[in-house]
Image: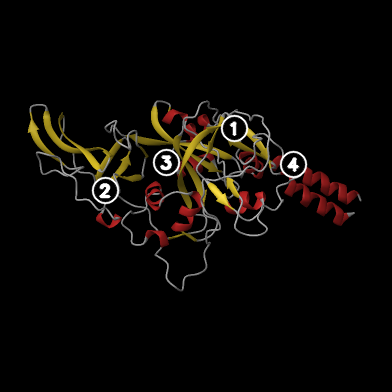
Amino acid sequence: MENAFAVMAILASVFWSTAVSKFYIESCSGEDKCKSLLGYRIVADTRISNVVAMFGVTTDEILGSNNYEVAIPEPDDVIIQAQELLRIPVSCACSNGIRRTDSIVYSVRQEGETLFSISNEVFGGMVTPLQIFQANSNDPAGDLSERGLNSSTEVAIGKRLMIPFPCACNAGNFKGIPAMFVSYMVQRGESTFEIASLFDSSVSSVVELNGMQKGSSLAAGDVLEVPIPACESSFDSRAVDYGLMVPNGTYTITADRCVQCSCNYPRLDCTPAPSSSGCPCPAPRCAGSNLKIGEFTTKASLQGCQVTSCSYNGFHDSVIFVGLESTNQSTCPVSSPPPTYRQYMPALTPDSSPIIEPQNIISNQVTPINAGTAQQSSSSFSSFHHIEKLLLVLTSLTLLLL
């Protein structure tokens, strides 16, 4: 009996030290949205097409956000290895006073799926069972137990659930620098330096943005926001891609898949998209010159160098806006080197090993789980609890020793 209570005391200590995870939360008001990113680690080897289906994004968005070469053959069948870190572009909205994604909907396809399994086995724990429940009820601060539910309650097949990942907009700016923000869940043993390095950010930026105190430690399961410098555009205000921002070290395919805009901060380079990307249009050229988008000529001048360039200015109603610009610079620029892309695995073959197949479909229709009203916290760090599973383990071990 004494041994049983000793085990209970030890496990309770571990429980209380690990049950609380830190989440960055950005408070908000109104109905404004922004483009944000999720740092998602692949659970098991899977095709890009499965990631596309899971998060409701396009193949081009996955390739560009992760700097995979857009011209690769059959990109949907490219394998992403287990534990590979992907940046997933998402829509970040304001919901009940805090920032949450509003573009990811999961549909239950198998018997035995629970809020806990969806949270942890599908989405890697970046969102809690309680958060999923609250996002799909009319009670944004409701409690599972009050509805006779828990995280192990089976969810009916066909149920569509909104998945409310934490995200951030911060007005597209961090300390006066254009930026986009990626939500990332800390892995066991990771340091702030390692996390900042994953996204070419800085330790001081991560610490400041997340309101961390000097000497504070990180724990597996903490969800942080990491600022990434981004290239701003100055497109025609009529353009559908007006206001485009591209995170450093990535690219975006735009203009009906005819233009690729790459960010080498702070420089945004827009050039014709590779022909193998399925671009149906000829290479756009600036009137009055033979220059294509992204090309320039140089000529010595009294100021140093006269540069004439053909710039991309946006896309609207099947029309690509371009502009011929002439500027004087102190020195003549050099052409940008060919882009360096992230490596990927070969396309699948019929004899490939089994991989994860999508177990969800994307739908815009979500039915509520329950009803009610309340509010959530908007502090820099907020605590959420994975209690039920740990209590179950604690109770089981104690009973074995009694």
- Quadrant for residue 379, please give it: top right
Image mark for residue 283: none
Q: Secondary structure at mark 4?
A: helix
Q: Nearer the viewer, mark 1 or mark 4?
A: 4
Quick one: label 3 or label 1, which is nearer the N terminus?
A: 3
Mark 4: amino acid: Arg
- Residue 400 x %, y %: 85, 57
The residue beneath circle 1 is 215
Spot the residue most to the bottom.
Answer: 351
Residue type indicated by callout 3: Asp
- CA separation in Å, label 2 and label 4: 51 Å
Q: Residue 258: x percent and y percent?
A: 26, 48
Q: Residue at x 51, y 29 (%)?
A: 208
Q: Which residue is mark 3?
A: 200
The C terminus - image quarter:
bottom right
- Residue pointed to by mark 4: 147
Judge depth for marks 1 and 2 and give the one in front.
2
Q: Amino acid at mark 2?
A: Cys
Residue receiving disc 2 = 258
